[in-house]
Each structure stands twice: as structure tokens, then as C-alpha cells.
Amino acid sequence: MKINPKKYATALIEMLEGADEKQSKKIISDFAQDLVRNNESFKLEKIIREFSLLFDTKYSIINVSITSASDLTLESEKTLNDYIKNNTKAKEVNIKKSLDASIIGGVVIRYGDKIFNASLRNQLNKLKESLLKS
């Protein structure tokens, strides 16, 4: 019987439940050896991806991409972190920051399938569109 990556990831999450660090290392090592023994190590990349999704969902972790025109201050980053936590009910927010001078100012926030575009460029484009419609 062939097992798909999501089932492997689910099984691994269940096996790791309540395990300490030493036990977790052994479980993961045994798991990897079983994949090799069963000639299914080629599934490892997909299993890791599924495991990450399941883990993040189980522990209410959200991964967010924030693009800004310039570096965010610590205060701005904390404000955005709190905003995202409040709107998503996440317990933990992992922020990946990037810079893009073309957005001129503001931020673009992406998480899951959502995009919140509060960039100055976006606001200028909306203004331009509304003026052209008039």
C-alpha cells in the first residue's frame, strides 16, 4: 500500500506529540530510515512541506511576508505583528521581511491566500483610476 506525503506527515505529527527533544530526534531518525528502507525517500520534500502546514495549523502559527519601501522600525514591526495576531487569532506570527522601493511607502502584507496592500503606490493607482473614471 502506497502512503501519500500528507499521511506520512500526519503520522509524524502524531508520533512527536508529547515527545521531548531526545525522543523527537530518535523518532525523526527512525522515520527517515523507514522512508529509505521503503524506497520512498523521494517523498521527503513533500512530506516536510505537509508537516510544516500541519504543524503550523495545529499550533496556530502563521507565516507572513511583509514588503516595505524601507526598513521597518521595531515599533512598526510589533504593531504589524499585533495586528496580524488579532485578525488571524494566531498564537505566533513568523514575519519574513523584504524591501521593494517601487511601492514608494507603506506595506504589503501577505499570509495564506490574503493580501493587504497598504502601499503608497497602490493608493496612487487607485486615485489615478478614480480620476480617469470622472
Image (cartoon, helix red, strand yellow):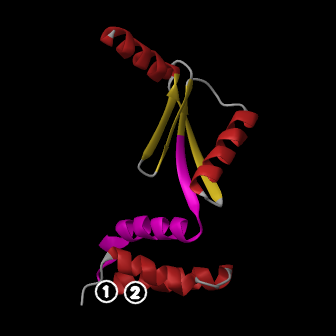
* Amino acid type, callout 1: Asn
Spot occupied by residue 97 in the image (x, y as percentages of width and height): 57, 38
Task: Characterize the magenta stretch by its predominant secondary structure.
Answer: helix
What's drawn in magenta, residue-wise?
Answer: 39-65
Q: Residue 64 bears which disc, if any? A: none
- Helix, strand or loop at label 1? It is loop
Q: Residues within 10 Å of mark 2 (few under 14, many from 20)?
A: few
50 magenta-colored: yes
Quarter of the picture holding the N terminus: bottom left
Left or right relative to 2: residue 29: right
Spot occupied by residue 66 in the image (x, y as percentages of width and height): 55, 38
Q: Which residue is the site of mark 1?
A: 38
* Amino acid type, callout 2: Asp
Q: Which residue is the site of mark 2?
A: 34
Measure how far apart labels 1 and 2 are at the Cα level: 6 Å
- Helix, strand or loop at label 2? It is helix
Spot occupied by residue 53 in the image (x, y as percentages of width and height): 46, 65
106 magenta-colored: no
- The residue that appears at 53% across and 86% down in the rendered structure is 15
Location of residue 59 with respect to 83 vertically, above or below? below
Q: Camera-side residue: 54 or 130?
A: 130
Location of residue 89 with respect to 22 vertically, above or below? above
Left or right relative to 60: residue 125: left
Location of residue 18 with respect to 81 vertically, above or below? below
- The residue that appears at 70% across and 40% down in the rendered structure is 79
Spot occupied by residue 88 in the image (x, y as percentages of width and height): 57, 54
How many numbered marks appear?
Answer: 2
- Contact flag, marks 1 and 2 (Cβ < 8 Å): yes
